[in-house]
Image (tube, rainbow, N blue to C red):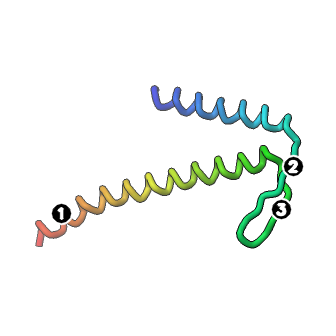
Amino acid sequence: MRRLLYILVIVALIVVGVLFGSINQQQTDLNLLIISMPLRVVDIALIFLLLGILLGLLIALLYSLQRKAKGWRRKSTESS
C-alpha cells in the first residue's frame, strides 16, 4: 500500500510538472554531437526525465539480475 502511495505521488508530481511546463512555449536549440534541433524547453526536460527513468530502471534490473545470478552459480556448484 505504501509503494502505491509513493507511485501515485510521483505520477501526480510529473503530471503537474508537465502541465506547468506546457505553459512555457519558449524554444531553444538542443546541440547534440551530430545535429542541432530547436525544441521547447518542456520537451527537453521531458526527454531527460524519461532518459533518467530508463537508466535507473536498467541499473536496477542489472543489479537484480546480478544478485540472482550469484545464488544460481552457488547452487549449481553445490549440486555437482
Distance in Å between CA atoms under marks 1 and 3: 53 Å
Q: Are marks 3 and 2 in contact (CB under 8 Å)?
A: no
Task: Look at the numbered disc 1 and give the secondary structure of its residue.
Answer: helix
First-in-chain label (3 vs 2): 2
Q: Residues within 10 Å of mark 1 (few under 14, many from 20)?
A: few
- Total labels drawn: 3
Please state which of residues 72 and 61 is positioned toward the viewer in this rendering: 61
Residue type at numbered disc 3 = Met
| Quarter occupied by residue 17 | top right
User: Residue under circle 1?
Assistant: 75
Please tell me how crowded label 2 is: few (under 14), some (14-19), or many (20+) other residues with Cα within 10 Å: some
Q: Position of residue 54 (x, y in %)?
A: 57, 53
The residue drawn where x is 70% and y is 52% is 47
Mark 1 vs 2: CB contact within 8 A: no
* Quarter of the image where one finds residue 14: top right
Residue pictured at 78% horizontal, 58% vertical: 30
Mark 2: amino acid: Gln
Could you tell me how far apart the alpha carbons at marks 3 and 2 are, in whole angstroms?
Answer: 10 Å
Q: Amino acid at mark 1?
A: Lys
Give the image location of residue 46, x and y in percent: 71, 47
Q: Which residue is mark 2?
A: 27
Please indicate whether residue 15 sits to the left or right of residue 74 in the image: right
Reading the image, the residue beneath label 3 is 37
Asked where in the image residue 55 lies, by quadrant, the reply is bottom right
Q: Position of residue 8 (x, y in %)?
A: 58, 30
38 to the left or right of 5:
right
Q: Of the residues tagged 1 and 2, which is closer to the observer?
A: 2
Judge depth for marks 1 and 3 and give the one in front.
Answer: 3
At horizontal 30% and vertical 56% (from top left) the residue drawn is 67
